[in-house]
Amino acid sequence: MLEKIIVMFTGLLSQFAPAQEQYPKNYFRSPIDTSIVLAGNFAELRPNHFHMGIDIKTNNHEGMPVHAAADGYVSRVKFSSFGYGKVLYVTHPNGYVSVYGHLSSFNDSIGVYMKTRQYASKTVELELFPKPNELPVKKGEVIAYSGNTGNSGGPHIHFEIREEKTEKATNPLLWGFEVKDNKKPQVTRVKIYPADENARVNGKNEALELQVNQGKQGFTTSAKEPVLVSGPIYFGLQAFDTETYGGGKNGVYSIELWVNKKLIYHHEMDKIGFDEMRTINSFIELPEYQKTGKLIQRSYVEPNNRLQIYKFVSNRGVINFNTDSTYKVEYILKDIEGNTTTVKFPVKSVPTDASTKTSDSTGCSSFFSYDKKNSYHTSDFMIDMPENVLYNNICFIYSSSLTNTKGYYSNLHHVHAATLPVNDFFTISIKSKPVPDSLKKHLFIAKIHPGGRKEYIGGEWHDDLLTAKTKEFGDYAICADTVAPVIIPVNINPGKKIGAQKSIELKITDNLSGLAHYEAYLDGNWILMDYEYKQNKLFYIIDRSKQYNPFNKQDEKHLFKLQATDKAGNTRVYKTTLVL
Ligand SMILES: [Zn+2]
């Protein structure tokens, strides 16, 4: 019997990720000289993605020296207004790549390498892949300075360790970085979900949320009586972890679910692929997050959820309650240091009452299978979806409504529900109302959010159809942007003497589609002007060095010109004369 159980057990385990990988503990050094305090940890739950590294605090300051974690070479360097901002990738001989994001600047040799190529190509937002012999680095060498560039909510260093071949991000804390942690994970809520239309939670086919409190006996729920469950049920919880210092609500490393001492579910946040990152939307309860901002982690694995964090999952996390008895449900949460929290609560199983079964009467526009290509076409709308874009099979529901509102150039198309997660891009095409050719180039497909906010998606014309790619269900229509970006000078004005000034700064905003491209010139010479989207700011650090001085010597007056174009093709030119 015991033998049989072991065989079954290993059989199930083989579908899941192997046991925690052992990494050498001293191969990488910390990218900073002071002790590491985390502002965020690996696999923390973020909008539309798991966090793929650790966020290291820099005392709320920029300019902290950033050291190479080990010998290697700079294999990628990127200058971007969004995402990781200014970022460096260092490839190491052990098959891993360390990543340093949101930097303010690079060291001299990397800085010169980048700047030369930016000026040569007249491109600010550049991504380069240096060869192994071009920018070698030594362990501990200062390669950059910390900052707050790109999509960053305050000064910090984003640090990752990726597998070079697979591009999967590993949990950096498995590599032996010292982060003091004597605090246990905290649980604030558990939630009990019916897995299909026949399941009941306290008599209803609805999920039930329970507050979790810490008492003398440890963590338990606020429910006075055991919750009644029948049919297929799964569980979820809201939890976070904190380290000794930092005080942030970070992610929990390991979560196990046991029912009557039987393991149902176990994940560990060891490694996540960039193609798996968006599966967060299946991992959490997306509708709840969209409605209330609560991140409930479900101990439930949808059929096409390909995350490799699962160590063990029985029946995708679904338990069939069909007896007449009480079950002990137990969640065990651990941080990476092994600090452990247990939440215990009972549920009372009641046998399924056949008469309560509801039939699935919802009318589908089409049935979409996650493992097949799916499409649905009408006379003025098309959706085309590659295989493996959905996490589960769905009854696809579509409708459209007429729009007489100003600013809409098509019907409003209701494409399933914005609450249903989608893993990757699919294509939608919308037929436009008759419009003059001069307007056509300013039209685009917009996602229409509740309340009417229009979000630019894109669009390519095929006759009178506009086609774009999106990763979200929801409402879509064709809209127009005919207003060019607005440029407001901050520290210059016509005829201003700028001889003592360090920089030239302007504010730039766009009403709808957003900034697509800009270029700036002094006396006709291209200048490297940086864009900080969080402040809508464009700035040029005046460079009077021999190589990059943009001012023509023979002129007394100097012409500054900035040209900016939005995503709908509207261009604004700002020109002014400056004096040195
Ligand atoms: Zn980060």
Image (cartoon, rainbow, N blue to C red):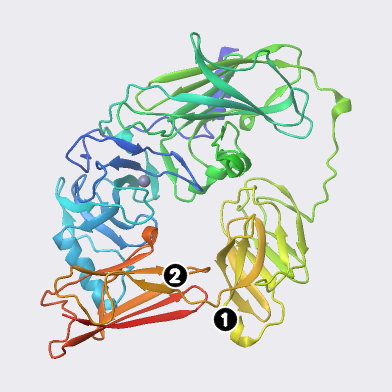
The C terminus is located in which quarter? bottom left
| Furthest-left residue in this view | 546
Instruction: Residue 110: tell me if it is visible.
Output: yes
Residue 525 at what x, y percent from top left? 24, 83
Indicate which disc residue 441 carries: 1
Residue 127 at what x, y percent from top left? 32, 65
Q: Amino acid at mark 2?
A: Leu
The N terminus is located in which quarter? top right
Q: Amino acid at mark 1?
A: Lys
Indicate which disc residue 515 carries: 2
Q: Is residue 505 left or right of residue 423?
A: left
Q: Nearer the viewer, residue 31 or 210?
A: 210
Q: Is residue 164 left or right of residue 329?
A: left
| Residue at the spot 47% in from the left edge and 69% down from the top edge | 510
Residue 136 at what x, y percent from top left? 17, 57
| Furthest-bottom residue in this view | 554
- The 10 Å Cα crowd at callout 2, few under 14, some 14 to 19, many 20 or more, is many
Instruction: Residue 134: tell me if it is visible.
Output: no
